[in-house]
Image (cartoon, coloured by chain):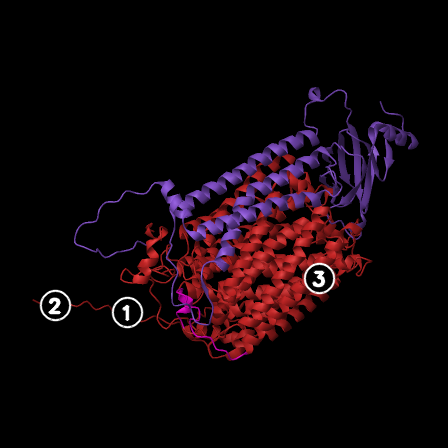
Chain colours: A red, B purple
Amino acid sequence: MSVTTAVFEQPAVLQPKQHGKPGGFLRHTNIFTGLAGGIVFAAVVYMIGSKLVPWGNQNEDFSQIGANALIAATMFAWVIGFMAGIGAFAGPIRWALGHDLTHDDAEYMAGKGQGKFRYWKYTTDHKVVGTQYFVMVLVLLGVGGFLAMLIRTELGWTWGELFDPNFYNSIIGTHGIVMVVSLIIVVTGPLGNFIMPIMVGARDMAFPRLNALSFWLLFAAVPPLLATLFMGGIRDGWSVYQPLATQAGMGMIGYQVLIIVFAYSTGVASVNLITTAVTMRARGMNWSRVPIFVIGIIASSVMGLIWFPMYQYSQALAMSDLILNSSFFNPVAGGSVWLYENLFWLLAHPEVYVIVVPATAGILELMTVFLRKPLFSYKLAIAGFAGVVGISAIVWVHHMYMTGFAPQVGYPFMLSTELISIPFGFLVLVALGTMWRGKVWTRLPMMCVYAVIWDKVIGGITGVYLSDVPVDQYMHGSMFVVAHFHFMLMGAGLFGAMACISYWFPKMCGRMLNERIGSIGFWVAFFGFQLTFFSMFVAGLQGMPRRVLQFDNAFNVSNWISTIGAYIIGIGMLIFLYAIITSWRGKTWAPANPWGAKTLEWQTSTPVPLENFPVLPVVTSDPYGYGVPDPYDAIERELAKDDNEAKVPQ
Amino acid sequence: MSIITPPETDQPEEPTARPMPTHRMKEYLSRSYVRRILIMAVIIMAITVALGWVVVGFMNMTGAPASDIMGDLEQTVLIFTIASAPLIAITLSTIFYSLIGWKHSSGDEPPMQDSPAIRTNAFAVIVWITATSLLAGFLVVWGLIELATITSNAYGSVSANQQPNDVKQIDINVTGQQWVWSFEYPDQQGITSDYLVVPVNTPLYFNLTSEDVIHDFWIVELGVKIDVNPGAITNTGVTPTKLGTFNIRCAELCGLHHAYMETKIQVVTQAEFDAWVRDKGGMKTA
């Protein structure tokens, strides 16, 4: 009898030839070469362009065709120059030269051995990109919040015009688009990039270089947006309806450049997130063991990937109207304003779910940890997200009930709008069921969850009114709508993101978030929020239109209350920001798993090493194995006696 | 996750019948937290329904609704509030009870004791899905019927032979431009005005267009709103039922002086309307 042993030989991986030092060209590029490249290329294009298309060129409507074209070319040149300067095109050029990446190159690009300076470079490590997104989001939210304070100051100043009306209109538009952009990335940017790959047990994202590309494209797109404030502004709200947008002139160019570039950034990021979650899960993590946060990220990315191109088309066509004198949206020359509105809302409604869905998934994820309970009805939660993604595609016209472009479409879109409350209801039941009979560990992230559910209830019931075409006939375009979507986007989206950030902060930043200061900030902001937007509901119901800077004396009191509330939000947010900054700079090091959670990202060390795991994990169960009753444990058996639910098999 | 209970004896267990649903409900209600949550839910439901009236109160500061459409709107708001009150009540009472009722722990370390492992509950899921679907279905049906009614009243989609003969509809051409409204009465020899004067209890039919950008024609107290688009004509209609002076505002951002683009509508008696038309140079209407 002989024993045979099989020997599996691993063939040596062929490494391409190393050309020069690891990293090659990227050793010399960083954000400063990027800035230099952007400024130089923009200046060159501006000088050449002003010879070809003089600034003063006007069309027969006296539109500034020449200036618009020049500004557009300069801004795109800035973006391209910046991306070239930071080294975004190094990869394709290497391929063209036949220099494949070696392992050392890849490690250099992931920031190995570069210390803190890797945050200023085109670094591919998903943790670096996540941190970059985090800082970017904080800056953008700060800008948007400051503009919100200006708006509320004007509206509380009921005895005169504080600002020039043009400036006021442009801060409304800029506040809107800055907040929309920052809320779209506030969860999927920092947490989707940093946490999600670790959560599924991957070493990095599927396409690390696209990951860096998505962040630096966003970075490059922000200066054109902020430049608009000095170029006539975005005077038409964030929806920039045509043909009013054409009157805003050069300010609109910055907006359009932002959207066109940002759409590439989100597209690249969405592809990356979806591919990572679908193909790079750890061994054993089948689809019934995926954490619900990952499902939320996938759902949000799918919606962004499908619908962002619509927004991009609408802005590309609008830009062509401004610089090529075309007339897609100019009714005098045969265009259609309704075409613009449809293209715009085709994205702009799913965008709301792009914001709310990942925040919701994040709070479902952390609820299980702080309640020490499994997620209630995992399959129902997935059905809820799937339903939201599916129906989100067919509800956009509810923003256009009152445009009159086809009164009959009110019927089907009222149907679909009210149906989307059913999958959202699934998610509510999942949250309530997870809460049911759970002993709460009252830490900041969990307390945020209560605030978020409260806000969602208020936003939900006011949404029921607005979904109805006849009632919308009264409420459309009034302050009621403004208060409603702030409850959804800020109350559920931003506060949900604050819950997620305070939950994952120990893993991302390596320190515990200062709970006391953070809680004070959060609750001050929360109560200011209620004050602001409940009185805004009242103003809207009394008939105050949105986007005005002066109004009837009947609305004075509610606007004063709103303004006071807005300042309280501002103070609360500053306290929360202070908590983040001091905790991040502090020395309260976080243990690897401070919350006792069971998902994979808490099982690796903090700070997370370069490739996340020393040995890739193998998953044997879903991450919600809390409170599994031990049959030999007398206490558990006592609990199980009156526990009808536990007897229902999974 | 089923519980594996070690058998107490070697004897096989007695087969037990599945309890009847009524029994299960009774068993549920015997739990103190279920009773407390239900009591809280009833209180919250009452508050929510009361808030429905507050909403309607703010919508109409001048007392009774000023038009047929406004009456329908207020009714819809109340019905929707009542219909969604149970779900709101269950949600809020559960989160409140979670905060105050079930035990909680604070401290830096994760709690040692886990909560019961409730993976799912088919009964709760089925009841919830059914209830929310019925609610959404009710809202849709109510909304569709309501919309059909308002559309037939407002947009003049009732066929001509069904129009009551004794009521004459007044057509009004509305033009929006940055940042004024102007009105033309084609049936009254085309008199023009920059504010509206209309007789009470007479159907009004608006043809609206814009000279420059999109505006939105909103008669606040009458509950009428429609976009005013350049290069297109939109229509809407309403029958004012109350005398008084009401506000017309622009509800779509239209540029520099959007905030000041407002005017008034005076709803007067037929005699006063005729007098006004004569003053404006038109002839007396029938």
Span highlighted in magenta in the image: A586-604
Across and down, in percent, residue B177 comes to 80, 44
Viewer-proximal residue among A631 and A86: A631
The chain that hosts pointer 3 is A
Look at label 3 and name its amino acid.
Ile
Left or right: where B174 falls relative to A509: right
Task: Give the secondary structure at mark 2.
Answer: loop
Whether residue A513 sits left or right of residue A4 in the image: it is right
Residue linked to disc 3: A564
* Up-down relation of residue A543 to residue A188 (above or below): above
Image: A636 above or below B175: below
Instruction: Report the residue marked by disc 2.
Output: A3
Q: Residue at x 66, y 71 (%)?
A: A40
B192 on left or right of A297:
right
Task: Of the two numbered discs 2 and 3 on the same chain, state the one appearing first in sequence.
Answer: 2
Residue A429 appearing in the image:
yes
Is residue A389 on the magenta stretch?
no
Q: Is residue B189 above or below residue A294?
A: above
The N terminus of chain A lies in quadrant:
bottom left
Decide whether residue A592 is among the magenta residues.
Answer: yes
Identified at 82% across, 43% down, the residue is B263
Give me the residue at 54% from left, 37% from top.
B138
Q: Secondary structure at mark 3?
A: helix
- For label 1, the residue is A10
Name the dominant secondary structure of the magenta segment: loop
A446 vs A215, nearest the viewer: A446
Q: Report the front residue among A187 and A99.
A: A187
